[in-house]
């Protein structure tokens, strides 16, 4: 009866957040910063610095589940970088003779994400954290297409955030974080637009016994961005994650089994499954499987007319993931890779990926 009593807050939280997310499935295409925010969360656990939403710990929790901030007793920092390769995908339509001919081509720039997180206890009040993140697409340029000095990337996203967490009772922790966002995009006409806004996340984490921790988080609660052009997607999609981590120790081996679910499953199942093992706390590896879908607004080159136009489409990331890590004293260095996102075909279409590979993640952080 005790376990049932202490886990009620998590169960209620999960029910409420699923309801919130279900209300968002009919919104318009999310802003490009929405992809950036999801990349921040994935960068941390794919970089082997945290174990998904149920087991985020310390500074690693700022972009995943802020409730995990409370699971430390001293200062922590973490630094991440992720690299996503250039992707070229050709869309073929079925013609009158029921043959497929090339219609359009997606040519997405190589992109990257950098994160810096810091967390520290505040006496008996709780844990506070700070994070700074940058995302960028394309090659760094000194001037724009008009010859004006920019010294920036054609498209970029910035986030500056603060988080807070504390333990409540009986292994239950609560966390919240808030982010200021800036997003710059470039339209096919080479016009650049910048939008600003805020996003908030609320999370819970519950320890059950000595070997299981479950958690849930509502991420990216927001009124959207403020673009001057009303035709640019400016909404940020509310995101719900629930999951758990099971811990087991056998002699010199530490094992973690993690499962995340990302409802609702409007465009197919969105979930992550992983197993992580460490030997003597010095060297570790992770294997897993990732399936994620997201609604994107991307430029596509129309082959016949040789023009660019913006198009809505579901993009999917699916396949095995792998990571390896080393503890050097109190510093952990890790690396990982995952499949790259690819466009999905609509009725009467085929997709051919001519270029695109895996995404790479690297991290360095302060361990226990």
Image: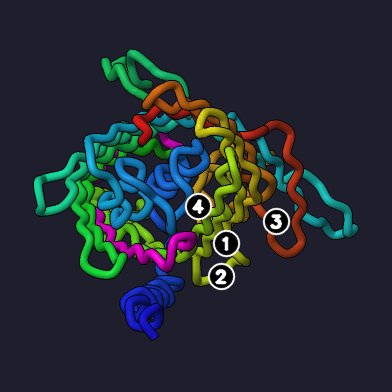
Picture layout, residue 231 above or below residue 152 = below
Where does label 2 land, which residue? 265
Q: Nearer the viewer, mark 1 or mark 4?
A: 1
The quarter in which the C terminus is drawn is top left
Nearest to N terminus: mark 1 or mark 3: 1
Measure the alpha-carbon separation of dots 1 and 3.
18 Å
Q: Nearer the viewer, mark 3 or mark 2?
A: 2
SS under mark 2: loop
Give the percent coordinates (x, y) of residue 51: 48, 48
Front residue of 72 and 67:
72
Q: Which region of the structure is painted magenta?
A: 188-212
Where does label 3 land, which residue? 345
Tell whether position 209 is magenta. yes
The reply to whether residue 239 is visible in this rendering is yes
SS under mark 4: strand
Q: Which mark is residue 296?
A: 4
The quarter in which the N terminus is drawn is bottom left
Where does label 1 land, which residue? 270
Q: Please indicate whether residue 63 sits to the left or right of residue 306 in the image.
A: left
Q: Nearer the viewer, mark 1 or mark 3?
A: 1
């Amino acid at each position: 009866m005790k376990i049932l009593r202490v886990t009620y807050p998590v169960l209620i939280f999960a029910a409420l957040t699923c309801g919130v997310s279900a209300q968002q499935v009919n919104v318009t295409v999310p802003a490009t910063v929405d992809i950036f925010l999801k990349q921040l969360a994935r960068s941390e656990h794919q970089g082997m610095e945290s174990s998904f939403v149920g087991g985020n710990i310390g500074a690693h929790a700022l972009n995943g589940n802020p409730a995990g901030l409370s699971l430390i007793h001293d200062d922590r920092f973490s630094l991440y970088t992720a690299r996503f390769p250039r992707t070229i995908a050709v869309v073929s339509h079925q013609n009158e003779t029921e043959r497929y001919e090339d219609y359009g081509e997606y040519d997405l720039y190589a992109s990257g994400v950098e994160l810096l997180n810091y967390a520290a206890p505040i006496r008996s009040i709780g844990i506070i954290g700070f994070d700074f993140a940058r995302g960028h697409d394309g090659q760094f340029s000194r001037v724009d297409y008009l010859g004006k000095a920019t010294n920036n990337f054609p498209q970029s996203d910035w986030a500056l955030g603060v988080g807070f967490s504390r333990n409540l009772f009986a292994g239950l922790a609560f966390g919240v974080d808030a982010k200021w966002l800036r997003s710059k995009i470039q339209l096919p006409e080479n016009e650049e637009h910048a939008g600003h806004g805020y996003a908030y996340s609320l999370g819970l984490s519950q320890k059950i016994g000595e070997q299981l921790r479950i958690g849930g988080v509502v991420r990216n609660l927001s009124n959207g961005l403020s673009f001057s052009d009303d035709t640019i997607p400016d909404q940020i999609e509310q995101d719900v994650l629930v999951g758990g981590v099971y811990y087991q120790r056998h002699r010199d081996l530490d094992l973690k089994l993690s499962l995340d679910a990302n409802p609702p499953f409007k465009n197919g199942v969105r979930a992550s499954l992983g197993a992580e093992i460490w030997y003597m706390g010095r060297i570790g590896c992770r294997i897993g499987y990732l399936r994620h879908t997201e609604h994107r607004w991307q430029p596509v080159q129309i082959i016949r007319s040789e023009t660019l136009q913006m198009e809505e489409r579901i993009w999917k990331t699916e396949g095995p993931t792998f990571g390896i890590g080393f503890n050097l004293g109190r510093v952990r260095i890790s690396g990982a890779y995952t499949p790259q996102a690819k466009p999905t075909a609509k009725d009467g279409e085929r997709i051919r990926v001519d270029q695109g590979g895996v995404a790479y993640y690297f991290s360095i952080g302060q361990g226990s």
